[in-house]
Amino acid sequence: MSSIKCPNCGLINFASAEACKRCKQTLDAPAYPYWQGNNAVAPPEPDWSKLQTEPAADYGDRSHTVGNILFAIYLGLHVLVLPLALIAISWMMSQEAWELLTTSNSRLYLPSFAPLYYLTLLVIVIYLPASVILMVRLLQKSETFLTWVVIYLLGEFVYALIQGVLMWGVSGEMNGKHIPQLEAAATQMQGGIGTCVISILITFVWFRYFNSSERARAVFSC
């Protein structure tokens, strides 16, 4: 026999060929499944979409975790404290000390004081409604919460960092005046720098929590 017909595509190949030149079918292998021609029933095709290598996590009724509840309290404190801070900072602008600290020809002039003041005022105005909206998203278990909380925490991190730098500058300017009253205020300002550091650490903890805890994130999954 000088030729062999490919059982797959029908091409006539040389008898010495190991595979079909057209479809590359191995010529000495069976071309058809074993169940064809012998009345056997073809096995069902497997549904690969249902293949699962790890058991699915069961998070029950999507109830809030302890961490989520603590973050809700954290937001609630923001909602309570920020209006009081807004009142206090607005009151300061109406006092004589504002003119003394922000007028360049004044003996008490502090160049870094006004930027620190306006930064704090801006953050309060932005973060007061943002805290309320984020808390509503949290309580509603809205999927958008996971996006907004990242933006919220990154904003807090940047604010605490800039605020700490400005406080350091104001503290140094106060000490440079060699006025006892300002030196006492500089000591209090340095305590505020420590608060900024704590705020940065707390922000990092919350950021890590919402990005690494599958249980916390599952609460907001549809």
Image (cartoon, rainbow, N blue to C red):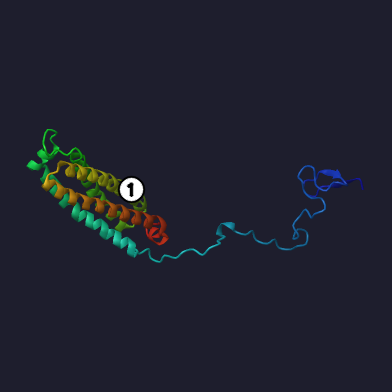
Image coords of residue 207 (percent x, y): 36, 54
* Relative horizontal placement of residue 104, taking residue 14 as reference (left or right): left
**Residue 201 is drawn in which quadrant?**
bottom left
Q: Nearer the viewer, residue 51 or 103?
A: 103
Counting the numbered discs, the total is 1
Q: Which residue occupies 40% across, 59% down?
A: 213
Q: Which residue occupies 80% across, 45% down?
A: 20
Label 1 crowd (10 A; few <14 / some 14-19 / many >=20): some
Q: Nearer the viewer, residue 91 or 138?
A: 91
Q: Which residue occupies 62% across, 59% down?
A: 46
Task: Looking at this view, name the residue that lies furthest to the front.
Answer: 178
**Residue 80 is drawn in which quadrant?**
bottom left
Image coords of residue 133 (percent x, y): 27, 51
Q: Nearer the viewer, residue 195 or 122?
A: 195
* Relative horizontal placement of residue 190, taking residue 14 as reference (left or right): left
Q: Do we see residue 111 in this rendering?
A: yes
Amino acid type, callout 1: Leu
Q: Secondary structure at mark 1?
A: helix
* Relative horizontal placement of residue 55, taking residue 64 as reference (left or right): right
Image coords of residue 49 (percent x, y): 56, 57
Circle 1 sits on which residue?
Answer: 154
Image coords of residue 6 (percent x, y): 81, 47
Q: Quadrant of the C terminus?
A: bottom left
Q: Nearer the viewer, residue 74 or 117?
A: 117
Q: Do we see residue 94 in this rendering?
A: no
* Relative horizontal placement of residue 44, taking residue 124 as reference (left or right): right
